[in-house]
Amino acid sequence: MKIIGNAAILTLGEKGFIPDGAIAIQGETIEEIGNTEDLRKKYPNAEFINAEHRLVMPGFLNAHMHLYSTFARGMALKGEPPKTFGEILEKLWWKLDKNLSTKEEIYYSAIVPLIEGIKTGTTAILDHHASFGLIDGSLDIVERAVLDAGVRAALCYETSDRWGKEARDASIRENVRFILKKKKDNITEPETLTAATFGMHASLTLSDETLEISKGEADKLGVGFHIHVAEGEEDVEDSLKKSGARVVERLQKFGILGDKTLAIHCIHINEKEIDILRETNTMVVHNPESNMNNAVGVAPILEFFKRGILTGIGTDGYTPSMFESVKVAYILPKLHYKDPRVGGAESQKMLFENNRKIFAKFFDKPVGVIEEGAYADIVILDYFPPTPFNEGNAFYHLIFGMRDNVVNTTIVNGKVLMKDHKLTEIDEEAVMAKAKEVAKKFWEKMQND
Ligand SMILES: [Zn+2]
């Protein structure tokens, strides 16, 4: 048992903000919330973590990530720079995922951002994986990295037709295999940290046949999909050409949408498509920095909120940091609509409330909230507010006062992964040195491709 005491607790749950309190953790879950003295008396043998009046809150949840994207960092592309989103996919991402072909490449590209996530307070991730050079078993390698890091993640493989039928079949097989593996009844700690869903790239690289087969398999397994939707105009043009229907309509026709499906981005969609997302209770995930970087446009987030679509927030591999992502989500609509009143309520709800609801579809106990019975996924922050702090203005303290380096301690599943800014379970220096070695060889392979 552990007690985090002398803590200013932002529960993001029914208990609101507790200016001076304590959290008792039993195994992987939160046992009790109370005051420090009482809990220490009640559980005298518990290990005591003194928060020293720091801010304690649930760890951040990243609702869309590509752990495999790491080795693109700093990489120069051959030839003219990509002019369009389609060219970015072809010249960078598809080339990168085709060349990911060894266990080491997949493992080290995954563990680097997992470590950076721990350091910036991210305790759970919905990941979308692609490594077309090594498909079979690749999710086990990502899972190994997740378990070694000690964080929580739901994984999937990016099904696509872009590398031919054999690779398509292998992608579907990999999703099915991993989902079945996670469905076994005898899963024990720490394997309960990971979950599975069915991954698909995007309408523009998915044939009718692939959508049909994937839907059949997902239905048998009782899972939904994790798919990019209308991220670029290319996706809309392709869908109209292929089917005469827009992206959301096409996916709806094949039964891809629904309350277990994550529709990522949803930028180029019209009113009718927003209605379909609402009617099917499909979840949407917003990734503002990635969208700006790819120059694909601004997602109609304000509309999603007006219509009551469950909209969360992720990073899309652009960064491991949810601080970064939410700060941009906060500021982007203000610039886009030239209206300083918009963006605050929406970005707060995405980070503090909707991500929690989204993650509840993938894990058996609550995350993203400090309450009895929830997983003990908690961060302790070096943040001592210089102005009054309460439940109502906490989000604005985060936007204007906190950044990555405030994360002092990260706890996942009741286990301390970082204390006083130092990782406790992983030799960070050794991992980063090895990653650099693997990445160097990977770059040579990319250059010769
Ligand atoms: Zn993505």
Image: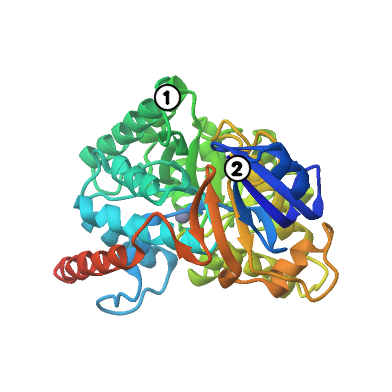
Chain-order first, disc 2 or disc 1: 2
Image quadrant in which you'd find residue 289 = bottom right
Q: Residue at x 38, y 44 (%)?
A: 147
Q: For the C terminus, give its image quadrant.
A: bottom left
Please state which of the two labelled residues, at mark 2 or mark 1, is closer to the viewer.
2
Q: For the N terminus, give its image quadrant.
A: top right
**Residue 116 vertical position relative to residue 204 in the rendered view, above or below:** below
Determine whether the beta carbon of the residue marked 2 sits less than 8 angstroms from the nearest atom of ligand 1: no
Where does residue 138 sit, x and y in percent of width and height? 28, 43
Determine whether the beta carbon of the residue marked 1 sits less than 8 angstroms from the nearest atom of ligand 1: no
Q: Secondary structure at mark 1?
A: helix
Give the Cα distance between marks 2 and 1. Answer: 34 Å
Q: Residue at x 72, y 49 (%)?
A: 22
The residue that disc 1 covers is 183
The amino acid type found where label 2 is placed reads Ala
The amino acid type found where label 1 is placed reads Lys
Where does residue 354 sit, x and y in percent of width and height? 68, 47
Where does residue 431 sit, x and y in percent of width and height? 30, 62
Q: Secondary structure at mark 2?
A: loop
Q: Nearer the viewer, residue 13 or 270?
A: 13
By what rule are the colours in the image chosen? rainbow
The residue carrying pointer 1 sits among few (fewer than 14), some (14 to 19) or many (20 or more) residues within 10 Å by Cα, namely few
Where does residue 405 sit, x and y in percent of width and height? 56, 72
Q: Nearer the viewer, residue 56 or 258?
A: 56
The residue carrying pointer 2 sits among few (fewer than 14), some (14 to 19) or many (20 or more) residues within 10 Å by Cα, namely some
Badge 2 vs badge 1, beta-carbon distance below 8 Å: no
The residue that disc 2 covers is 46
Q: Is residue 136 left or right of residue 227?
A: left
Q: Nearer the viewer, residue 253 or 62?
A: 62
Q: Residue at x 79, y 76 (%)?
A: 386
